[in-house]
Amino acid sequence: MTHDEATSLRDLQCGHLTRGDEGRRVSVCGWVAKRREHGEHLVFLDVRDWTGVVQAVVPGSVDVRAEYVVRVTGTVSARPAGTVNERLATGQVELTDCEVEVLNAAEAPPFPLDERTEIDEAVRLRFRYLDLRREPMQRSLRTRALINRTLRASLDAQGFCEIETPLLWAPTPEGAREFVVPSRLHPGEFYVLPQSPQIAKQLLMVGGFDRYYQIARCLRDEDLRADRQFEFTQLDVEASFVTQDDVMGFVSRAVAAAAQAVTGEAPEAIATMSWAEALERFGTDKPDLRFAMELGDLTAAFAGTGVAALAAPCVKGLRVPGGAAFARSRLDALTEQARALGAKGLAWFKVGEGGLESPLARHLSPAEAAAIAALDAPAPGDLVLVVADEHDLACRVLGALRVTLGAPPVGEGPYRYAWITEFPMFEGVDEDGNLVAAHHPFTMPVAEDLERLESDPLSVRSQAYDLVLNGWELGSGSVRIHRADIQSRVFRALGIGEEEAAARFGFLLGAFRYGAPPHAGFAFGIDRLSAILVGEENIREVIAFPKTQSGTDLMTGAPKAITARQLRELRLPAPAPRG
Ligand code: ASP
């Protein structure tokens, strides 16, 4: 305890009473967690605040029920022999001879706050203020605060300056749908809530703040998932006169400090692997390195195969330890999953003592069978799954099956971080024939690839890098384009014409004409990092007031209709009545 927890109403917090306080007359404040009558003249109250529970023995009668807010003044006493509660931090002592002052009455809560009973999430979200009073949410949010504080301390120590950027902003092209805010003073015009402070932080670099950070709220109007909310929080970082390695160093140090603050252990040095290697070995750019099961390559062995189902530009295999025991229904489910991911099919081979067992086994040449049997050192009792297809698809499908078959829950340690580098600059081509940026359009191509930007754009790599933890993408960043001529070429490649670029990002391109330093940055999701470090699968567990999967706030009822007057002021039409 580094601060004085005493206030005008209390001397200390409920969970902090110890034998050392014996004999003191003290006041604590909190909620009544439980009451028990002891004969006619003694009431036992458990009084709770976030630090713990203390037992208060009250002579006579007292009119309190569960969740009443009380101030209890009593004498710290050792519990009589035989009544010590080892499970409670304060279990050695109790407050005796107590006076109880009711600070507020409470209705019976809709669910018990003490027990670790599973409560339906909809009920928890509707009464979030009560859910927050419970131990798991207290622990989650306090852990998150510790993470924030440690990240700040690390970046401050590394010479970064914390700067806030606007929430009412102009559109930025980062790929997600944006929330828009109508302007009352400029009817028909809109602000956009930032997907991230991306452009603002680049302008800060032009402004001479060579190391910036912010714990920034970002907003994206995208479908919600376990690891995604409309609004989320990023540790946003940008620095000038740096390379990719410098930025990865800043971020690695900050993340390691936060992880150590929570778990008590410094994470091991973070592995770095190129995007191509991650795809090849793990079938994803978010490899979960907590378990092995690496993909193997069978392309050469099947180059001239006579098995039509396995004739393809790429043949990849995945060894599943113990998988020979899978029932047919399980293999069918995996095949379904592979198909849903775009594969034409999934071949499976059980590795038995006497050779491979599979509907396809008798069609294989001896060399092909040997290659499958030898894949990634299989042992009898294993299963080998094979996908033959285009390279990326074959890798991705097996990468997904690898996670299905091998990954522990995301929040389960050990924590395995990885930096993924050398992403392709473009993800592909959209319906209009325009290239799609893999990161965002301010990302600098790898210098030696720049000359192919117009002639062979899909082969251009970018100076982008992702940080991955236990199979979750924590965040991404890149070296930025700091020259207006290269930025114009990239906009052109993305199908953003001169005029559109001038209209949307004229201010950025303008800024680049006045001496923009080379710069690079990164942003990672604090919601995700916090969820993983507290061992939760869903980021809602580390957010005080999250939205449901369908984007509603069950407590406030948002989103809601606004009044006719507000609509008029914004010059927005009244919505058509619901039919
Ligand atoms: N602005 C990017 C994002 O939100 C991160 C970065 O490039 O710094 O994903």
Image (cartoon, rainbow, N blue to C red):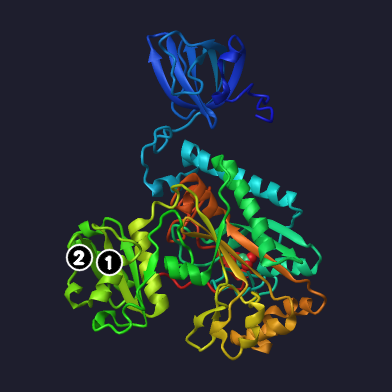
Examine the image and state in which quarter residue 453 appears.
bottom right
Report whether 442 appears left or right of 352.
Answer: right
Q: Position of residue 114 (x, y in %)?
A: 42, 32
Quadrant of the drawing holding the N terminus = top right
Numbered label attached to residue 164: none
Numbered label attached to residue 355: 2
Rendered residue at 40%/63% (across/down)? 294
Of 17 and 146, nearer the camera is 146
Instruction: Report the amino acid beneath label 1.
Output: Ala
Of 381 and 47, nearer the camera is 381
Numbered label attached to residue 373: 1
**Mark 1 near ligand 1 (CB under 8 Å)?**
no
Report whether 311 appears left or right of 176.
Answer: left
Secondary structure under the numbered disc 1 in the rendered image: helix
Residue 423 position (above or below residue 143): below
Rendered residue at 42%/68% (across/down)? 283
Residue 107 position (above or below residue 428): above
Mark 2: give few (<14), some (14-19) or many (20+) Cα within 10 Å. some
Q: Position of residue 534 (x, y in %)?
A: 49, 45
**Mark 2 near ligand 1 (CB under 8 Å)?**
no
Report whether 570 appears left or right of 44.
Answer: right
Which numbered disc, 1 or 2, marks the residue that appears first in the sequence? 2
Instruction: Report the amino acid beneath label 2.
Output: Gly
Q: Position of residue 437 (x, y in %)?
A: 56, 78
Of 555 and 413, nearer the camera is 413
Mark 1: give few (<14), some (14-19) or many (20+) Cα within 10 Å. many
Rendered residue at 73%/65% (across/down)? 242
Residue 42 position (above or below residue 237): above
